[in-house]
Image (spheres, helix red, strand yellow):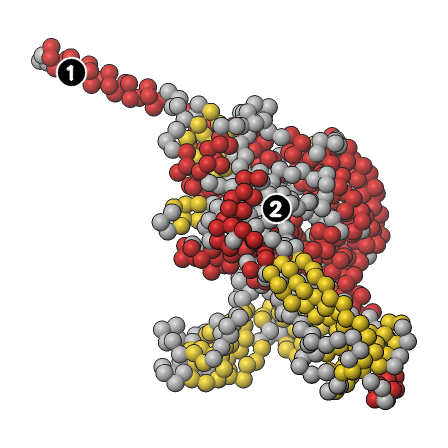
């Protein structure tokens, strides 16, 4: 039998167990903080301590359904939101934590998309959107995060409505034009609101190039030695225009009989002010020009720098401020820190009091420009903690911001006019006297100087030689990603946060292809834009698209009702849609036959265009569905079996590689193009490496042989 002492002990043990169970069920004194990304959640949780549970929504949790329009056109364009497929466990986990938390705060990204995600989270977690549940921070560091947590606000419904308007408008256009394109052109196509206007820009530029007629002109300059060259600027007091070889020979003959006399010398000074700190758009452009990054890659790397990187000896830190911004504004605190840093590192004379104005005065100015979160973290100090791409982009952002807060660069200038009869030549020179902001950030125009020797008015100059060169006017260049982004910004097409995805869609849909660094429209792109231009003129009209962006921005500013704007647009669009469906005839694609015959049915094989380039398909489709890749010869023989190595593409990735034509019996393959010579060190095939530092190297990864 149990003794009294034993019973007492058992009761105490049971009481302790009950207390522990009750403690588990009782809501802990914790606050749930929801952010978008897991990496951000990991870093922020270290800043907030044990009283906070930080979780990630991993982007959007609710959206319009993919399988149908998802917008009730007859019910004032009410969106039909559903939980996103694959997010069930995330939503379940968030609900569980929210129920047991003392407080729930939503700290998604500080923009339209982030506000909409918070709004959807509030709905799912049963939060009052008008309560103080929304937290925003422009940069991820301990002080900023902790201060933001203390000052929550209600969800900004105007921002949410601005996001809803764009989402619904894009859905109405995309989901109703795309099926038309499938029926009339080819399956898998799409016709988005902003992407169509962007495609129109690219196609219009290609038409300009094709219609361009070059005009002849001649460059004439006088070389007086010591790198002192003056260009022909005027003939008989008017701007020089030389358009033929005959005219050039006549000018040369007249000049030979005269003297080159210095007419005037004008000396002056000029300053060049630094560039403004980066916005999303200018960062995309500059990273494309200076680093060769595609816009999508720039945004991916910038997101990593914003969300945070673990630095050796420092810990996890967000390195830059929020990356989706149209503003060039810099906070007073950041400007003050920059001034102190510049004074200490470069000297008082390099400091300045620079302010930058936004192009759009009416825009919301919630975010600063993109800048380093901590200016004292110089790029080279943390280089070992970053990937090569992260370092390059951080270095660019850091230098741009530091330079933006520095003094102007100063130059001495001189302009010399030289006469020879009725002909006038001009030489301009400049010399930098103070580098200012250029000490940190080089000008796109370069820092080269043009010097003019010591001369005086009235001096007679000794001509070394007369330079004449025939030239022709050039057509406008195709858009690069950088120039397209600039044009879209100038024309008010889309928003900087969407530029990367727009370009990606145009390329993925095969409307546009990259030719070196340029964007060239394909025949498919012209076919699509032809239909859209004939039947949906507003969709491809650049001015209309820009005006629509302004209307959508007015929703964000609280000046317009989003459903009214959608209704105004849809009235004309629905009529265009009906007419197009009735009138547009299917575009018959030209069949290009190859020399190959289908080994299954004996019919000729046609060359088709696919996602990863051209391929061969049987003309007997749909009875015969045989397809095969187009083999490109290299003329290089396989070192293993002696058969030819040919260029191939991966079936899933589309990536080019080089493999033996004897496959599957022979499995020799290379990612880089073989050169037909063997490595002198190990006997493996030598290949051409790709990239900026292209060279001949050994295909054996364990061999270090390389030819420069």
Q: Residue furthest top?
A: 4
User: Which residue: 76% across, 67% down?
Assistant: 266
Q: Which quadrant, please, contains the N terminus?
A: top left
Q: Is residue 232 left or right of residue 487?
A: right
Q: Is residue 455 left or right of residue 635?
A: right
Other-residue count near label 2 (Cα within 10 Å), few / some / many at <14 / 14–19 / ≥20: few
- Can you identify the residue that label 1 sits on? 9
Residue 613: % across, % down: 62, 67
User: Which residue: 75% across, 41% down?
Assistant: 550
Q: Is residue 250 visible?
A: yes
Q: Is residue 569 left or right of residue 112?
A: right
- First in residue order: circle 2 vs circle 1: 1
Distance from disc 2 to disc 1, alpha carbons, whole Å, reads 75 Å
Q: Is residue 232 visible?
A: no
Q: Is residue 425 left or right of residue 378?
A: right
The relative height of residue 182 versus residue 553 in the rendered view (above or below) is: below
* Element carrying mark 2: loop
Please tell me in which quadrant of the rendered image residue 466 appears. Answer: bottom right
- Judge by depth and name the residue closer to the eye, 194 or 41: 41
Other-residue count near label 1 (Cα within 10 Å), few / some / many at <14 / 14–19 / ≥20: few
- Judge by depth and name the residue closer to the eye, 442 or 304: 442
Residue 189: % across, % down: 69, 55
Total marks shown come to: 2
User: Which residue: 70% across, 66% down?
Assistant: 413
- Judge by depth and name the residue closer to the eye, 60 or 215: 215
- Can you identify the residue that label 2 sits on? 353
Please tell me in which quadrant of the rendered image residue 251 appears. Answer: bottom right
């Amino acid at each position: 039998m149990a003794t009294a002492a034993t019973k007492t002990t058992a009761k105490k043990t049971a009481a302790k167990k009950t207390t522990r169970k009750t403690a588990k069920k009782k809501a802990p004194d914790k606050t749930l903080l929801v952010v978008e990304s897991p990496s951000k959640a990991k870093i922020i949780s270290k800043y907030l301590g044990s009283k906070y549970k930080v979780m990630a929504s991993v982007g959007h949790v609710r959206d319009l359904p993919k399988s149908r329009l998802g917008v009730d056109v007859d019910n004032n364009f009410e969106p039909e939101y559903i939980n996103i497929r694959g997010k069930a466990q995330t939503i379940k986990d968030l609900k569980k934590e929210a129920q047991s938390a003392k407080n729930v705060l939503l700290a998604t990204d500080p923009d339209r998309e982030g506000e909409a995600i918070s709004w959807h989270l509030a709905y799912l977690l049963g939060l009052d959107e008008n309560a103080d549940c929304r937290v925003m921070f422009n940069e991820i560091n301990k002080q900023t995060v902790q201060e933001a947590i203390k000052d929550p606000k209600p969800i900004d419904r105007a921002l949410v409505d601005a996001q809803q308007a764009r989402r619904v408008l894009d859905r109405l256009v995309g989901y109703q034009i795309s099926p038309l394109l499938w029926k009339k052109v080819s399956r898998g196509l799409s016709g988005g609101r902003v992407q169509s206007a962007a495609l129109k820009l690219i196609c219009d530029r290609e038409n300009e190039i094709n219609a361009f007629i070059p005009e002849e002109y001649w460059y004439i300059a006088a070389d007086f030695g010591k790198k002192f060259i003056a260009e022909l600027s005027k003939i008989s007091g008017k701007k020089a225009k030389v358009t033929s070889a005959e005219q050039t020979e006549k000018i040369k003959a007249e000049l030979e009989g005269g003297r080159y006399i210095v007419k005037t010398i004008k000396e002056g000074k000029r300053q060049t002010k630094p560039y403004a700190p980066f916005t999303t758009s200018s960062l995309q452009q500059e990273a494309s020009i200076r680093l060769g990054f595609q816009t999508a890659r720039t945004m991916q790397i910038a997101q990593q720098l914003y969300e945070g990187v673990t630095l050796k000896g420092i810990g996890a830190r967000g390195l830059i401020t929020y990356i989706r911004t149209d503003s060039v504004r810099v906070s007073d605190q950041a400007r003050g820190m920059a001034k102190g840093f510049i004074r200490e590192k470069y000297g008082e004379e390099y400091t300045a009091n620079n302010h930058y104005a936004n192009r759009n005065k009416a825009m919301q100015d919630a975010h600063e420009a993109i800048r380093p979160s901590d200016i004292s973290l110089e790029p080279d100090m943390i280089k070992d903690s970053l990937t090569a791409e992260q370092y390059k982009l951080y270095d660019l952002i850091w230098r741009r911001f530091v330079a933006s807060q520095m003094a102007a660069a100063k130059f001495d200038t001189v302009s010399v006019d030289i006469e020879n009869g009725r002909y006038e030549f001009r030489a301009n020179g400049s010399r930098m006297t103070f580098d200012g902001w250029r000490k940190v950030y080089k000008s796109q125009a370069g820092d080269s100087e043009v010097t003019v020797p010591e001369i005086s008015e009235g001096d007679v100059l000794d001509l070394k030689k007369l330079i004449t060169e025939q030239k022709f006017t050039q057509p406008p260049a195709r858009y690069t990603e950088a120039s397209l982004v600039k044009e879209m910004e100038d024309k008010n097409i889309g928003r900087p946060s969407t530029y990367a995805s727009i370009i990606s869609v145009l390329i993925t849909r095969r409307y546009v292809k990259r030719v070196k660094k340029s964007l060239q429209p394909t025949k498919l792109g012209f076919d699509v834009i032809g239909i859209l231009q004939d039947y949906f003129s507003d969709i491809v009209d650049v001015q209309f698209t820009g005006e629509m962006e302004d209307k959508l921005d007015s929703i964000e500013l609280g000046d317009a009702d989003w459903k009214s704007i959608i209704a105004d647009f849809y009235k004309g669009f629905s009529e265009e849609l009906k007419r197009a469906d009735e009138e547009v005839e299917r575009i018959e694609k030209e069949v290009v036959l190859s020399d190959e015959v289908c080994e299954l049915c004996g019919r000729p094989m046609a060359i088709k265009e696919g996602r990863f380039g051209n391929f061969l398909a049987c003309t007997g489709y749909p009875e015969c569905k045989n397809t095969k890749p187009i083999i490109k010869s290299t003329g290089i023989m396989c070192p293993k079996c002696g058969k030819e190595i040919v260029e191939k593409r991966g079936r899933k990735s589309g990536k080019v590689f080089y493999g033996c034509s004897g496959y599957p019996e022979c499995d020799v393959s290379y990612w880089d193009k073989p050169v037909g010579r063997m490595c002198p060190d190990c006997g493996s095939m030598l290949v051409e490496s790709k990239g900026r530092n292209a060279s001949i190297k050994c295909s054996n990864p364990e061999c270090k042989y390389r030819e420069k």
